[in-house]
Image (cartoon, rainbow, N blue to C red):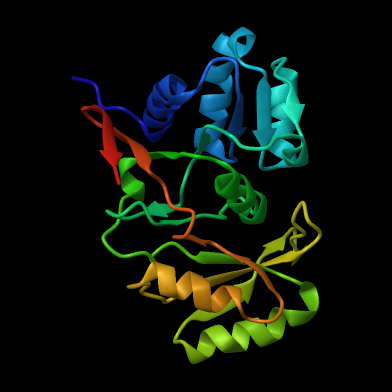
């Protein structure tokens, strides 16, 4: 029996997510390597949907290249489903997201959607959030203050760089990545950090959690519901 690579698992869950796409509607599409597999699969049914709302410029370009119309979120009242990956997901459907720096737009679209379907490989399933560096999108002038606030919580935070200079998100902001946290109460943590001055979005998705997770495993796709 051949073992499936992580790339194979991403392809499996990307295709499995197609059954959650509602024909005739606009689908919410996330960002990242697993979502790219979903976008490629979505091309097979592009004639059955109106189009997509996308969480990043990168996903928008990929969708358009495949002939799928992309709408601005302000043009759409509500989405039936949002399909996106996660850097971590726990047994309650709470997630850490933002490894691809698109967390703010991802959270906006998640809030606009009736259902969040997370697609991930089994390495992303954890008991407690916090092993993956927590991304936090911040207004640049608040960076050092936010880093100090995380230090007070026992976390080590640093500014995300790209080619030696601060990474700039699609929204023109910076990302702080935080390690050393054990997020035992994701709802309370998300609520608290969201109030810090200068924080645009914290990468804990607890208020906008997943209702379904399609988990790629060696024995196929496992469906978790929360």
Q: Is residue 175 rendered to the left or right of residue 179?
A: right
Q: Residue at x 77, y 64 (%)?
A: 173
Q: Is residue 222 rendered to the left or right of residue 143?
A: left
Name which quarter of the figure residue 137 lies in: bottom right
Name which quarter of the figure residue 131 lies in: bottom left
Q: Is residue 173 rendered to the left or right of residue 199?
A: right
Q: Residue at x 51, y 35 (%)?
A: 83
- Residue 15 sits above or below residue 77 on the image: above
Identity of the residue furthest to the bottom in this view: 152
Q: Residue at x 41, y 47 (%)?
A: 210
- The quarter of the image holding the N terminus is top left
Q: Residue at x 29, y 41 (%)?
A: 225
Q: Nearer the viewer, residue 52 or 128?
A: 52
Residue 169: x %, y % from top left: 74, 56
Residue 46: x %, y % from top left: 62, 12
- Residue 132 sits above or below residue 20 on the image: below
- Residue 108 sits above or below residue 63 on the image: below
Name which quarter of the figure residue 45 lies in: top right
Residue 147: x %, y % from top left: 61, 83
Q: How many numbered tags mark residues here?
A: 0
- Residue 167 sits above or below residue 212 on the image: below
Identity of the residue furthest to the left in this view: 1
Q: Is residue 67 rendered to the left or right of residue 226?
A: right
Q: Nearer the viewer, residue 96 or 83?
A: 83
Q: Nearer the viewer, residue 75 or 45?
A: 75
Residue 113: x %, y % from top left: 55, 41
């Amino acid at each position: 029996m051949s073992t499936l690579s992580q790339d194979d698992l991403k392809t499996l869950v990307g295709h499995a997510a197609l059954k959650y796409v509602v024909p005739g509607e606009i689908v919410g599409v996330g960002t990242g390597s697993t979502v790219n597999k979903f976008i490629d699969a979505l091309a097979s049914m592009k004639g059955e949907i109106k189009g997509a709302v996308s969480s990043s410029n990168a996903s928008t370009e990929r969708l358009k290249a495949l002939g799928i119309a992309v709408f601005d979120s302000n043009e759409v009242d509500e989405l039936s489903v949002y399909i996106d990956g996660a850097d971590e997901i726990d047994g309650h459907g709470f997630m850490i997201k933002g490894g691809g720096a698109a967390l703010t737009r991802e959270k906006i679209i998640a809030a606009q959607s009736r259902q969040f379907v997370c697609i991930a490989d089994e390495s992303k399933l954890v008991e407690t959030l916090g092993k993956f560096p927590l991304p936090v999108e911040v207004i640049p002038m608040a960076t050092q203050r936010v880093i100090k606030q995380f230090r007070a919580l026992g976390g080590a935070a640093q500014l995300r760089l790209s080619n030696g200079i601060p990474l700039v998100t699609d929204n023109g902001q910076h990302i702080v990545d935080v390690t050393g946290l054990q997020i035992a109460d994701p709802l309370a943590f998300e609520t608290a950090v969201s109030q810090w001055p200068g924080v645009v979005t914290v990468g804990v998705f607890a208020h906008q959690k997943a209702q379904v997770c399609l988990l790629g495993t060696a024995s196929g796709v496992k469906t978790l519901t929360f």
